[in-house]
Image (cartoon, rainbow, N blue to C red):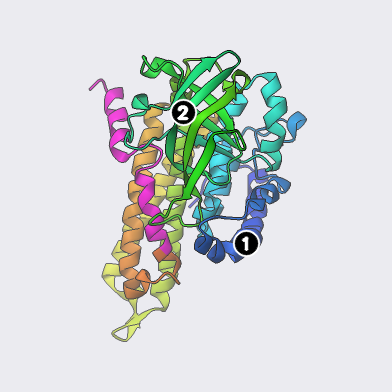
Amino acid sequence: MRRDIFEPEHADYRESVRRFVAEELVPNNEQWEADGIIDRKVFEKAAGKGMLAMAVDEEHGGSGVDDFRFNQILSEELAYAGVAAAGLGLALHNDICLPYFLEYCTPEQRERWLPGIADGTLITAIAMTEPGIGSDLASMSTSAIRDNGHYVVNGAKTFITNGIHADLVITAVKTDPSQKHRGMSLLIIERGMDGFDRGRNLEKVGMHSQDTAELFFQDVAVPVENRLGEEGQGFTYLVSNLPQERLSIAVSAVASAQAALDWTVEYVKERQAFGQAIATFQNTRFALAEMKTEIELATAYVDKSVVALNAGELTPEEAAMAKWWTTELQGRVVDRCVQLHGGYGYMLEYPIARAFVDARITRIYGGTTEIMKEIIGRSMGL
């Protein structure tokens, strides 16, 4: 497919990313899948190649390149290589957590945190979800009560990506428990703070190499200097950054669908049934043609959305459309591709099997399909 959004420097960057992924992630992926976590040194290695926190200014150790197309390329190449789960922490760090630090940090906070975020020695995570509340963020109960120069934090978070590795956790808390949205603030809770504990690395159906944890806070004294932005504005900050988060998920979803299709095309050309290649059957050709069409349409919409994001024009409903459509497409495509692989599609030695179990969560995290449709419906005045 011809894609017009990239410049020559993006093509050079893609080649560098492809080499990095092939050399550093692919050979270790099986072990990380078994371990349930990647080596945290991957973040530092990615930083050394200019693939981490690219938007951080040069003064604080970054490249000073605020162009989401570079983030897009990294996510695409991770998916094409079949290591999207291992690379999810990098995408979270770059696409989802970094904007909070760039937009809401004070000069002192920038000096304190940005250099480590840029060189990979400070890994980031964002903690919103709590046990039992699902998508109802305003109902969170994690509290942060002001006590002189500190907030005393109590509560728990769950399903936190990078939860084991994270050094800096953007934590959504209630600084005014009597309020819902207006009582929410964002605090940076740091590794080693007294009363901050991590639970187990959660055992998931898929995404095995991505560490996902429960976090517990018991009377954690967090300095007021660790608050991001203004008190009571946390919900506003979260909502303003969600479009980029959802577009990041959409980028990975459509790239993962493309990878599944590519693996399957290669497989059906070689696999024989009834004395001929599976690819020669009309059903196979029709199925692959339908998937190719849907993927190319989705890719065009995602590319358009990336351009809009770079221009500061991507709306919440446009991001919601990209997120729900591409993740549902990813699920459909990997399911059909497993079917075309037959029994071998259920064997983890084939990348399509791992893609199948990894795909299911994408329709849930970052906002469920149902929530995305609700956002779109409300934008229509319904």
Residue pushed farthest left?
382
Nearer to me, 202 or 95: 202
Dot 1, crowdedness within 10 Å: few (<14), some or many (≥20)?
some
Residue at the spot 42% in from the left edge and 69% down from the top edge: 348
User: Which disc is residue 22 wearing?
Assistant: 1
Quadrant containing the C terminus is top left
278 relative to 80 in the view: left or right: left
Residue at the spot 46% in from the left edge and 18% down from the top edge: 175
* Kind of element beneath mark 1: helix
Q: Is residue 336 visible?
A: yes
Q: Position of residue 64 (x, y in %)?
A: 70, 32
Q: Quadrant of residue 93?
A: top right
Q: Position of residue 101 (x, y in %)?
A: 60, 28
Label 2 sits on residue = 154
| 198, above or below 170, in the image | below
* Kind of element beneath mark 2: strand
Q: Position of residue 36 (x, y in %)?
A: 50, 57
The answer to whether residue 308 is magenta is no
- The amino acid type of the residue labelled 1 equals Ala
Mark 1 against mark 2, which lies toward the viewer? 2
Dot 2, crowdedness within 10 Å: few (<14), some or many (≥20)?
many
The region drawn magenta spans 354-382
Residue at the spot 49% in from the left edge and 54% down from the top edge: 85
Q: Quadrant of residue 347?
A: bottom left
Residue pushed farthest bottom?
275
